[in-house]
Image (cartoon, rainbow, N blue to C red):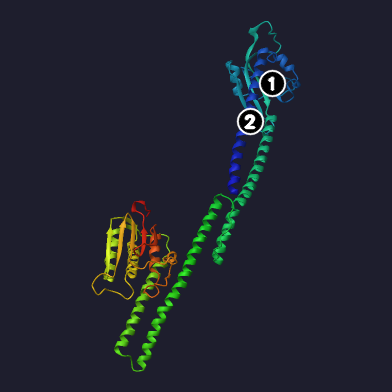
């Protein structure tokens, strides 16, 4: 920014200085040319200086010392000037004016600037009276020639030289001032960015996700607010991971302890001669059930550990087909239930595997609580409960015939590893409904639970239509 300000001001000063210098120079030369032509023309008309007798007798003081030189050039090339006064520069341009006798005047610059003899020379056509010839009463005695006037350019050269020094000095001062101002503005403007950089380095060094203070509403402040939002998201993600690891360790401890106990019991029994076949089979079945529970728990943990803000490889899915497949799957696992299913087509963009897992968890949960504990089938062949599944306009409702959810448990049913007192005696890891919420959020939807009077618990899952989703 400092270099940019200095270069910008330097270019502006250079352009203005060159323009000012050229303008002043042209104007001074134009004024000098106009003055010389006017004075030379008047002198040629009056005939005082074109009378060679008068011209040669004139003193140099009459022409402003050495500042102005006056002379007459005849058509034959003869040159005349006042006594004790040098001749003005006379060349081919002035000779052509003397010979042609037209209405034009010649203008040229002779000499080198600051070289000692630098003149602006003007020549106008004139008719002069030769020396010792009385021409007052006989116009025929006048001969063609040119009156030549040379004006020294020393004062103009000095003025332009001084002007150049002033322009260079003020331009240099302006560039230095612009550089200092640009540096001050850059330091002041980038100070919040320096604080933000320091905060980022502090986070990388200490992993402390504490937000930084933000003041103002400029772009740097917006960047700081975005950085704080990122820190907040990172802090939440880290907290979720910590809770997940802590809860997972707690939940894994119980089945692992049970498996270890059963294996130790089996090993000790083998040392003592072994168990009865039926006892051994019961022990192995218990171990197998615990391993199945561990497998389900690890799968649920793997699903929840994917802490992604949204579904990545989304595809167009017909939600009614996903729900229908889940109903067929869960119906085989719960043959003692009566299922009431009403589905209408509804397309969504999403992950078919994750949505299928979420819907299956909802149906498994409804089936589990619709069956009274310890009852798989009534003796008279009638269903022990029923589950109602409806999909209308992207709203999936699953209603069971169980006892419902206690009011104190309703706000926590979607928390990870949360299990109500009624659910502790039933199989499950406490992650099924958490996966449902996770899937709904990843697809831009929502899930909530309530109790239905005269029935049981009802879970409502809403997903946006494919036409309104962003991929």
**Image vertical order of residue 231 relative to residue 94, above or below:** below
Task: Identify the residue position indicated by label 2 in the image.
Answer: 25
Spot occupied by residue 321 in the image (x, y as percentages of width and height): 28, 60
Of labels 1 and 2, earlier in sequence is 2
The image quadrant of residue 53 is top right
Who's the residue at 59% across and 45% down the image? 7
The residue closer to the viewer here, 117 or 422, is: 422
Q: Quadrant of the C terminus?
A: bottom left
Q: Residues within 10 Å of mark 1 (few under 14, many from 20)?
A: many
Residue furthest to the front:
454
Who's the residue at 63% across and 22% down the image? 34
Who's the residue at 68% across and 25% down the image? 151
What distance separates the C-alpha of mark 1 from that of mark 2? 24 Å
Spot occupied by residue 25 in the image (x, y as percentages of width and height): 63, 30
Determine whether label 1 and label 2 are within 8 Å by CB: no
Task: Identify the residue position indicated by label 1 in the image.
Answer: 70
Q: Residues within 10 Å of mark 2 (few under 14, many from 20)?
A: some
Q: Say if residue 190 shows up in the picture.
A: yes
The residue closer to the viewer here, 5 or 331, is: 331
The residue closer to the viewer here, 266 or 44, is: 266
Query: What secondary structure is marked by label 1?
Result: strand
The image quadrant of residue 260 is bottom left
Looking at the rendered image, the disc whose residue lies closer to the viewer, 1 or 2, is 2
Spot occupied by residue 45 in the image (x, y as percentages of width and height): 65, 13
């Amino acid at each position: 920014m400092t270099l940019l300000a200095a270069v910008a001001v330097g270019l502006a000063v250079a352009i203005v200085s060159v323009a000012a210098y050229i303008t002043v120079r042209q104007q001074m030369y134009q004024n000098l040319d106009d003055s010389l032509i006017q004075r030379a023309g008047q002198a040629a008309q009056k005939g005082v200086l074109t009378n060679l007798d008068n011209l040669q007798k004139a003193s140099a003081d009459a022409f402003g010392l050495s500042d102005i030189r006056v002379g007459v050039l005849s058509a034959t090339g003869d040159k005349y000037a006042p006594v004790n006064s040098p001749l003005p520069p006379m060349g081919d341009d002035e000779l052509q004016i003397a010979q042609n006798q037209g209405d034009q005047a010649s203008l040229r610059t002779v000499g080198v600037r600051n070289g000692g003899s630098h003149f602006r020379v003007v020549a106008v056509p004139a008719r002069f009276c030769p020396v010792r010839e009385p021409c007052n009463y006989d116009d025929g005695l006048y001969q063609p020639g040119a009156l030549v006037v040379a004006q020294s350019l020393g004062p103009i050269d000095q003025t332009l030289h001084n002007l150049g020094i002033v322009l260079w000095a003020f331009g240099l001062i302006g560039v230095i001032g612009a550089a200092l101002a640009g540096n001050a503005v850059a330091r002041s403007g980038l100070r919040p960015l320096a604080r933000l950089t320091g905060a980022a380095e502090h986070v990388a060094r200490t992993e402390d996700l504490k937000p930084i203070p933000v003041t103002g509403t400029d772009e740097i402040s917006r960047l700081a607010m975005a950085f704080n939002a990122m820190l907040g998201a990172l802090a939440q993600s880290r907290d979720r991971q910590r809770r997940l690891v802590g809860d997972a360790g707690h939940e894994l401890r119980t089945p692992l302890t049970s498996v270890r106990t059963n294996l130790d019991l089996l090993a000790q029994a083998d040392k003592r001669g072994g168990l009865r076949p039926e006892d051994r089979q019961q022990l192995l079945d218990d171990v197998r059930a615990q391993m199945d529970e561990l497998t389900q728990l690890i799968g649920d943990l793997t699903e929840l550990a994917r802490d992604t803000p949204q579904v990545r490889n989304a595809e167009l899915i017909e939600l009614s087909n996903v729900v229908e497949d889940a109903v067929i799957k869960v119906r085989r696992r719960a043959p003692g239930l009566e299922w009431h299913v009403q589905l209408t087509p509804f397309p969504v963009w999403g992950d078919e595997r994750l949505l299928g897992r979420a819907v299956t968890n909802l149906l498994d949960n409804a089936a589990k609580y619709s069956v009274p504990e310890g009852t798989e089938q009534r003796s008279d062949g009638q269903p022990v409960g029923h589950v109602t599944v409806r999909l209308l306009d992207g709203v999936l409702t699953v209603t069971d015939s169980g006892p419902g959810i206690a009011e104190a448990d309703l706000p926590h049913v979607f928390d990870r590893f949360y299990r109500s007192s009624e659910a502790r005696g039933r199989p499950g890891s406490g992650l099924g409904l958490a996966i449902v919420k996770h899937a709904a959020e990843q697809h831009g939807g929502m899930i909530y639970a309530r109790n239905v009077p005269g029935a049981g618990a009802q879970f409502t899952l809403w997903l946006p239509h494919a036409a309104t989703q962003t991929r």
